[in-house]
Image (cartoon, rainbow, N blue to C red):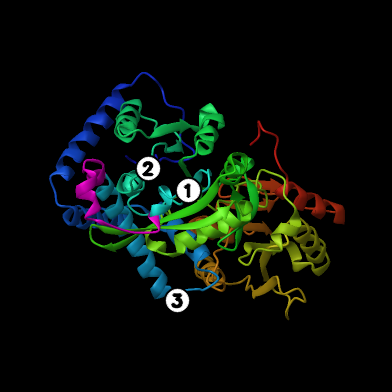
Amino acid sequence: MRFCIKHSDSMAAPTSDRPTLLHRLEYGAFRSVEGIVARLPMDSCAVLGRLIGRFFQLVSPRYRHLIRRNLRIATAENPLCREELDQLVDETFRRAGANFISSLKSATMSLEQLAENIETTHCDLLSRERAGNGLLVTIPHMGNWEIMTKLSGLHAGISNFGAVYRPLDNPLMDKLTNERRTADGCQLFSRRDGFHAPIALLRSPGPMGVLADQRAGAQGVVMPFFGKLTSCTPLPDLMARRAKADVCTLSISTIDHGRWHAEMRLLGKSPGVAGIITALETAMRVSLADVFWFHDRWRTDRTRPLSFYTKFDPEIAKQATVPMRLLLTLHDDSQQDADILFEALFAERPDLRIDWLTSLPGKHPDPRVVKHAWDHSAPDEHASGALDRIDQSHPAPLDAALLFGGTQVIAKAAKRAGLRSIIGCDVHGKPWTRSFPYPKHPDEWKEIASKLAEVPKPKQA
């Protein structure tokens, strides 16, 4: 029997029932690669995957930036030096490649063969009697995910087991994956079909797997994740409470080339969304290099950088230990305008840290505002270096730029640095992502702060 989890992006597009030519080509390429991998020993698959991961790192500046950003946030409470962070980024790419190729190999192996590559801790939770309660297994995207699909097969006594999943874009690959993962009795439940059926399975009782670490957008609950605010899914908590099921987490970490350790941690009755998210952090910290950091968990919106697309209590933001960082410039460095704007911004997001490029001397009385000396006469080519120094002045990365000083040179440097949101006043064209009229009245500064944090209507979102 298998404990089946379908590893797919939560933002996957609806699957078409009729395969296109591109789908057929993708499927043919996948089966060809899978056939080659199936003939290799597991340790060779892992070594090959590490080489592929390293190659992908060299040719993908976008993901180099994203993974570095994610890892800076994940380690901000216990920051790494630059060399240590470089090593962690490198290893994350290599393990992503190794886990991907090894998962292809794992899908073709028998349980007996795969058992030689897995060590487990507390995985007997899957078959343990729990006084009639089901078991909701909350899982982060990490490690060789095909191990997750087969864990229950290594433990006897499971009659009902299943997973909530999103179908793959390619209907041919989706069908193949479903056939493999339901062959031993696993029940797959699409999120598009609602949650009555998976809750019924939990009540039967049986174990149910849910991937729970991705950004949830407008459907989520805003809370700290690795100390930094983001939108987290309430789904595991809702399902566990309705089914009166126990909750546990699962982590998969690499021991050696082609060998992994699977560990479950029982939480008991649901500790709530915040408790589950904290437990997921603990599971992920077992091996940060094994986590799939290719998902932009803390993405900043281009035009509403202070918004989570859902309402939240600003008091929650005070619990954040890793700030959202804004780069700021103002015309004429007006202290009066700055104080009005700061008050409005902190009212919307108490978790902010504002890095203010200014010619005004001295420290700001609010420790959340950090002044950086700005030499207007400096050559344009120095902008990127200055921005990098500001970015590196805190363990967490810069998130957005509010360049109300109309600083085109700094805006271009921010774009090169990978900031998604670069907002100005009375500006147009690239690299700006939004422009406001320059305020002439104090209330207009408050209005700007409100618009940067507003929750858009569903059609806008």
**Could you tell me the amino acid type at mark 3?**
Cys
Q: Quadrant of the N terminus?
A: top left
Q: Earlier in the sequence, mark 3 or mark 2?
A: 2
Q: Where does the image place residue 76, in percent across and percent down from the top left?
A: 53, 69
Magenta residues, as a range? 104-123
Q: Nearer the viewer, mark 1 or mark 3?
A: 1
**Could you tell me the amino acid type at mark 1?**
Val
Residues at circles 3 and 2 in contact by the CB criterion of under 8 Å: no
Q: Where does the image place residue 361, in percent across and percent down from the top left?
A: 73, 79
> In the rendered image, which quarter is residue 359 located in?
bottom right
Residue at horizontal 60 percent and vertical 60 percent from the top: 228
**Marker disc for residue 81:** 3
Residue at the disc numbered 1: 137
Label 2 crowd (10 A; few <14 / some 14-19 / many >=20): many
Q: Is residue 180 left or right of residue 310?
A: left
Residues at circles 1 and 2 in contact by the CB criterion of under 8 Å: yes
In the image, 3 versus 172, the foreground residue is 3
In the image, 400 versus 404, the foreground residue is 400
Residue at horizontal 76 percent and vertical 61 percent from the top: 346
Q: Nearer the viewer, mark 3 or mark 2?
A: 2
Residues at circles 1 and 3 in contact by the CB criterion of under 8 Å: no
Q: Is residue 264 left or right of residue 351?
A: left
Label 3 crowd (10 A; few <14 / some 14-19 / many >=20): few
Q: Earlier in the sequence, mark 1 or mark 3?
A: 3
Q: In terms of secondary structure, where does tag 2 sit? A: loop
Q: Residue furthest top?
A: 18
**Marker disc for residue 3:** 2
Residue 125 shows up from this direction = yes
Q: CA distance from mark 3 to mark 2?
A: 39 Å
In the image, 285 versus 371, the foreground residue is 285
